[in-house]
Amino acid sequence: MRPWLALLLVATLVVCATWWRSGSDVPSAKKNAIVAPEAVATSSVNPVRTTPRPALSPPPLNPGQIRARRNAQQAQRKANIDRIVAAGRKKIAGRYESEPIDSPWANATRQELMEYSLSDQIRATHSEPSNLNIDCRRTTCRIDADFPNATAADDWSTLYLTGAGSRLPNASLQKSDNADGSVHLTIYALARS
């Protein structure tokens, strides 16, 4: 026998013995998977997961964090609503400022809107306006009035716009504080298309 062939035979035996010995250290389920992959496919052993595990969900929020998150969401919704309302007000106010006056229509509409300013319900809630000024142009009107407090302004504007609703289908209200603590209300309204 040739010496290199004997050396090759010894090396092969060493490799096989090492491989066989390392296989005997594997638990039986894994040994079966290594020796007979087709047996794994038919057995109840779960296949190896190839997709990454999903990230763990964050820990639950405590009541303070929940409240803070809810408050932030409410503040965001209010800011969005305020932005939409301001854009609508700006649109009607811009139209009012830029349009010419149609005197016959403006005078008739002004007189009709003045009649809505004092109703039995308005008197019953003690929300009569002071310094009431109604100015109409061609399709829009501006209504200004002062009230002793915000509640009176809210009561009057609700009752006024309910009564004048058919004449003022689109209106935008804005309240501001006067120097004496009373409330000033400005209404821009679209009175006809």
Image: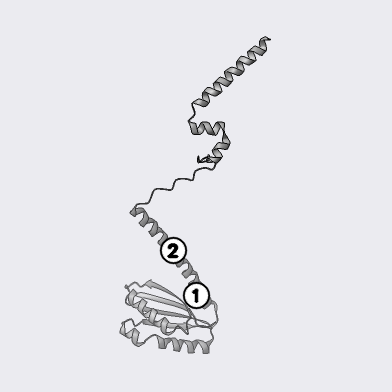
Q: Using the image, determine if residue 12 lies above or below residue 76.
A: above
- In the rendering, at what x and y percent does residue 144 appear? 41, 79
Give whichever of 14, 57 is nearer the camera: 14
Q: Report the amino acid beneath label 1.
A: Ala
Q: Quadrant of residue 183?
A: bottom left
Is disc 1 placed on a helix, strand or loop? helix
Q: Residue 58, how many percent across, how many down?
A: 42, 48
Q: Which mark is residue 93?
A: 1
Dot in front, 2 or 1: 2
Quarter-wise, where is residue 165 in the image? Answer: bottom left
Q: Disc count in the image?
A: 2
Q: Which mark is residue 106?
A: none
At a point 43% along the width and 61% down the height, the residue shown is 76
Kind of residue indicated by mark 2? Arg
Residue 186: image quadrant is: bottom left
Q: Which residue is mark 2?
A: 77
* 36, 135: nearer the viewer: 36
Q: Position of residue 127 (x, y in %)?
A: 33, 81
Frontmost residue, 38 versus 64: 38
Estimate the x, y position of residue 180 in percent, counting from the top left: 32, 73
Quadrant showing the N terminus: top right
Q: Earlier in the sequence, mark 2 or mark 1?
A: 2
Residue 173, placed above or below residue 18: below
> Which residue is drawn at the image coordinates 40% and 62% (left, top)?
74
